[in-house]
Amino acid sequence: MTQSSPAPRGRLAATSSRRTPVWIFAEHMCRFITTVVFDLKVYGSYHVPKTGGALLVSNHQSYLDPILLGVGLDRTISYMAKAELFKNPFFARLIRSLNAFPIEQGTGDLGAMKGSIARLNQGDLLNVFPEGSRTDDGKIAPMEKGVAVLIRRAKVPVIPVVIDGSFRAWSKHRKFPQAYPIRVMFGPAMHQMWELDRGQIIEKIDVTLHRMFDDLQAGRIGPNPPRPVGR
C-alpha cells in the first residue's frame, strides 16, 4: 500500500490532540485516583519523544488502560475507541474532548485508518491496542494485522508499552474496579518498522511486548526508577 496523502489543513487542525480544559481536569483527577487507589508506578516514560508523531502500542487488560497511559506522560494522547461508545451524544462529546475518535472494529475502517495517519503525520501521539480488545485472562492475546498496516503507512516511531495489574483491578469479568497495584513500563522506540513486511511487524511487536511483560512482572525494570505520576 502507498502512504495516503496529507489531509487538508483544516481537517488536521480539527483532529489535533488538544490539551482541553476537560483533559487537564481529567488528568489531575485521574493522577490522584490512580496513585491512591492503584499505587500506580510508571517506568521508562523518558522513552516517549517530547514532540513529533509516534505510535504507542500496548497490551490491553482493562478499561483503565487508556487512563493509565495518559497520566503517565506529559504529552496528550489521541485514542482509537470503538464506535459504539459514540452512540450516546453526551458521552461522545466527552470522549471527543479527550481526543478519542471512533473506529468500527473488525470492518477494516478506512476512515479511522486515514484519521489515524493524519494525526500521526501532524505530530500527534496515538495509542492503539494491537490485540484489538481486552484480554480474557490477563495474558497478552494475539496481535491483529491492522496495526501493521497503520505502521507501514504512517512511518513513525513505535513505542512499546506494557501494563500489569489493571486486569486484577478491573477485568472484563468484573462489574466494578477494585484496588490493586498497577505498573506501566514504556520501552525504547522501535524505528524504521515500516520497512518490514506486515508479518515481521506483527512478530516484532508480539515478541517485544511479551518480553517486556515478563520483565515487568519479574521486576526486571533495569535502572529505571518509577516516575512520580503526580509530577
Image (spheres, rainbow, N blue to C red):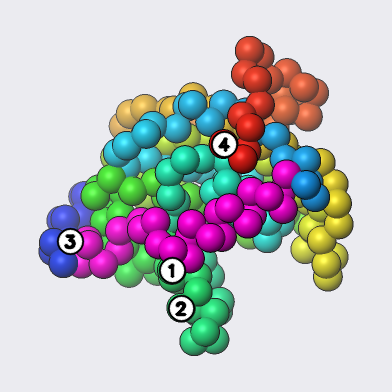
Q: Name the residue under label 1.
A: 97
Identify the residue at image location x=56%, y=60%: 26
Q: How crowded is mark 2: few (under 14 residues within 10 Å), some or many (20 or more)?
A: few
Viewer-nearest of discs 4 and 2: 4
Residue 170 appears in view: yes
Could you tell me how far apart the alpha carbons at marks 4 and 1 are, in whole angstroms? Answer: 23 Å
Q: Mark 3 points at which residue?
A: 7
Q: Is 114 placed above or below 95 here?
A: above
Identify the residue at image location x=50%, y=74%: 94
Numbered mark located on residue 149 in the image:
none
Numbered mark located on residue 93 in the image:
2
Residue 34 on image: x %, y %: 71, 49
Q: Residues within 10 Å of mark 1 (few under 14, many from 20)?
A: some
Magenta stretch, residue numbers? 11-35
Q: Is 85 placed above or below 56 here?
A: below
| 1 or 3: tag closer to the N-terminus | 3
Element at label 1: helix
Residue type beneath disc 4 = Arg
Q: Residues within 10 Å of mark 4 (few under 14, many from 20)?
A: few
| Quadrant in which the C terminus appears | top right
Identify the residue at image location x=44%, y=51%: 77
Left or right: 112, with 69 as reference point:
left
Could you tell me how far apart the alpha carbons at marks 1 and 3 are, in whole angstroms? Answer: 21 Å
Foreground of the two, 167 or 46: 46
Foreground of the two, 127 or 26: 26
Residue 97 on image: x %, y %: 43, 68
| 4 or 3: tag closer to the N-terminus | 3
Numbered mark located on residue 231 in the image:
4
Identify the residue at image location x=72%, y=53%: 33
